[in-house]
Image (cartoon, rainbow, N blue to C red):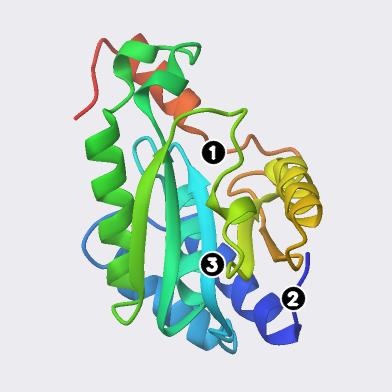
Amino acid sequence: MEGNGDWAGALGALEGWCAGAAGGAGAAGAARGAAAAGGGLGAAFGAVAVGGTFDRLHAGHRLLLAAAALAVREGGTLYLGVSADTLLEGKAHRDLIQGYAERAAAAEAFVRAVHPGLLVAAGPLEDPREPPLAATLREMEALVVSRETTGGADWIQGVRRDLGFAPLRVLVVGLVGGGEGGAKLSSTALREEEAAQGRGPS
């Protein structure tokens, strides 16, 4: 994990909160409180990127999004990339995945609630072969990723290097439910459970 002690302490508090958190209206405020109890995430960056599919916005998503939102300083911009529907054709139980508009709206609403003082630039991630804004925007400063997607961060850093841009600070968060002997919380598992019960997305 990259970051200073404040980031590590606050992230640990966030991870602890997310591991036992339910959704609902109080989730964003609880995320802010958990981070503050851990010493704060520093809010040191003016331009931060984060991306994902964000289907069913479970606790793992909330951890990633809260960490990203709280790393943005007041008045800074969070660049929020959400997988377009066309990218998801190979996903398990594709018919149960929420549509792009619903997923993007939920993710954006959550980060705005966590950090009302940030600007959000949300948009679709449409082509995995095309570098995202994290790679091509010169003024980008930081990238927040999960532990399982650090390879993508390495690729983005390589693109920036080729373009002559400064490297990003890469802030890595853990996986909720991904501890020793524990299964990672995932949207795929949630969809499989819904399929087994004969339910679709809410």
Element at label 2: loop
- How far separated are the C-alphas under marks 2 and 1? 25 Å
Which residue is more in the foreground, 135 or 30? 135
Looking at the image, the residue that sits furthest to the front is 163
The image quarter in which residue 85 lies: top left
Of mark 2 and mark 1, the one earlier in the sequence is: 2
Element at label 1: loop
User: Mark 3 = which residue?
Assistant: 48
Q: For the residue marked with disc 1, what is the amino acid? A: Leu
User: Mark 2 = which residue?
Assistant: 3
Q: Is residue 140 left or right of residue 194?
A: right
Residue depth check, mark 2 versus mark 1: number of the one nearer the observer: 2
- How far separated are the C-alphas under marks 3 and 2? 14 Å
Q: Residue at x 53, y 84 (%)?
A: 43
Q: In the rendered view of the protein, which quadrant contains the C terminus?
A: top left
Q: Is residue 108 left or right of residue 70?
A: left
Q: Position of residue 56 (x, y in %)?
A: 34, 37
Q: For the residue marked with disc 2, what is the amino acid? A: Gly
Q: For the residue marked with disc 3, what is the amino acid? A: Val
Q: Residue at x 55, y 86 (%)?
A: 40
Element at label 3: strand
Q: Position of residue 122 (x, y in %)?
A: 35, 53
User: Mark 1 = which residue?
Assistant: 185
Of mark 3 and mark 2, the one earlier in the sequence is: 2
Q: Residues within 10 Å of mark 3 (few under 14, many from 20)?
A: many
**Disc number for residue 110:** none
Q: Residue at x 59, y 89 (%)?
A: 39
The image quarter in which residue 112 lies: bottom left
Q: Position of residue 190 (x, y in %)?
A: 42, 27
Q: Residue at x 64, y 34 (%)?
A: 183
Q: From the viewer's perspective, is residue 196 above or below residue 189?
A: above
Q: In the rendered view of the protein, which quadrant contains the N terminus?
A: bottom right
